[in-house]
Amino acid sequence: MIALEKLRQVEDFDWTAISPPAVIQAGERSGKFRIGTDTMVVDAAGNGRISREDFAVAVVNEIESPKHVRRRFTVGY
């Protein structure tokens, strides 16, 4: 958290941070995941998870079309 707070104070550098869910495991690419900001994305049972394939898609999507410049975001099902 300290590093994130320091980044948030920087005004002359563009950054993006992604916070993964509790579990990233092999699976299939569904392309169906949710994006959050400062709170881990969890399912109805309170589990934070995503497949490695969908996590990769979320990262590439952010690189190709930045939507979280100077912010942190999270992904999960």
Image: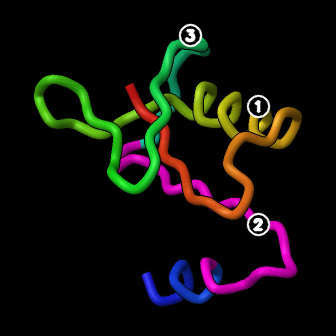
Name the amino acid type tagged 2. Trp
Whichever of labels 1 and 2 marks the residue nearer the N terminus, that label is 2
Location of mark 2 (residue): 15
Name the amino acid type tagged 1. Asn
| Placement of 13 over or under 36, stated as above or below | below
Q: How far across and down, in percent of the image, does residue 30 sit?
A: 56, 10
Quadrant holding the C terminus: top left
Name the amino acid type tagged 3. Ser
Report helix, strand or loop for mark 3: loop
Q: Residue shown at 70%/60% (left/top)?
A: 16
Q: Which mark is residue 61?
A: 1
Left or right, 50 with respect to 22, comes to right
Task: Say how many tags the image has.
Answer: 3
Residue range highlighted in magenta: 8-23
Whichever of labels 2 and 3 marks the residue nearer the N terminus, that label is 2
Whichever of labels 3 and 1 marks the residue nearer the N terminus, that label is 3
Given residues 72 and 20, the one toward you in this image is: 72
